[in-house]
Image: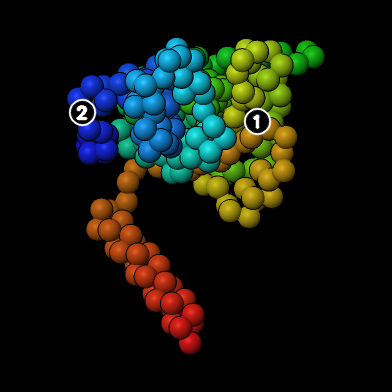
Amino acid sequence: MHLVRRTRSIEERRFYEAEALRGGWSVRQLDRQIGSQFYTRALLSNNKRGMLEEGSQPLPGDLVTPEEAIKDPYILEFLNLKDEYSESDLEDALIHRLEDFLLELGNDFTFVGRQRRLRLDESWFRVDLLFFHRRLRCLVIIDLKLGELTHADVGQMHMYCNYARAHWTLPDENPPVGLILCARAKSALARYALDGLPNKIMAAQYQTVLPDVRLLEAELERTRRELETRRITRSGDVEG
């Protein structure tokens, strides 16, 4: 609907749809191209090939960041894991319901493999899940943890990212991103453990059972009112 309203003809809409798919445009890039009348400029250009090739290249402001691509929390109630379970049970359930998990992750994730082995000195390690993100153009390493995030989890993921950067990343790809999926991530520990690392490592919580919908609605309404009260207070301070 957004695209229909901003284009003037079926041909123009189809052009943007085709170019967005061909170039893997982000929403920002699509908005910029429509706003700059890229379709019209391409029609009138004497070098249409050059225009299309140039138009497929993202600008810095078009790029999707890992923070935008990674959700928090992830809702995994479709796994039906309501009692005690192990990390292996969680991984098996995610693979069994891979299609649902990919939908929860987002449209740009593609599955690469599970239990990918790597050897350091005489020790073997295994990466739980490995994905590729099309817009970020990088591998996403997912490590599953049942409990609370620890600094040891971050250190292990840092090692995985270093190895993946050296051995699994192709020349035209960006450095890998590490995602630690855990049941709980304390904000202070996560902030100090994750900030300032040379690799991009993130922690996100998952929930296998959703709280009561009425509780969620009440919490959302309370948050909305807090934001509205803060806005009114700030507005009053400015006027005063």
Q: Amino acid at mark 2?
A: Ser
Circle 1 sits on which residue? 157
Write the residue at 48% across / 30% down. Answer: 86
Q: Amino acid at mark 1?
A: Met
Front one among 174 and 21 = 21
- Callout 1: few (<14), some (14-19), or many (20+) C-alpha neighbours within 10 Å? many
Q: Tell me where residue 98 appears, x and y as whole percent.
A: 37, 21
Quadrant in which residue 34 is drawn:
top left
Q: Tell me where residue 181 appears, x and y as whole percent.
A: 51, 36
Write the residue at 52% across / 47% down. Answer: 184
Per the model, the C-alpha gap separating discs 2 and 1 is 49 Å
Q: Which mark is residue 84?
A: none
Where 10 sits versus 235, above or below?
Answer: above
Q: Residue furthest bottom?
A: 240
* Quadrant, the N terminus: top left
Where 166 sits versus 104, above or below?
Answer: above
In the picture, measured across the screen, residue 155 lies left or right of residue 76, that is right
Circle 2 sits on which residue? 9
Q: Residue furthest right?
A: 121
Write the residue at 69% across / 50% down. Answer: 192
State which tag comes first along the sequence, 2 or 1: 2
In the picture, measured across the screen, residue 99 lies left or right of residue 156, that is left
Front one among 78 and 139 = 139
Label 1 residue SS? helix
Q: Tell me where residue 195 appears, x and y as whole percent.
A: 68, 45
Front one among 8 and 149 = 8
Disc nearest the viewer among 2 and 1: 2
In the picture, measured across the screen, residue 39 lies left or right of residue 57, that is left
Would you say residue 152 is visible in this rendering? no
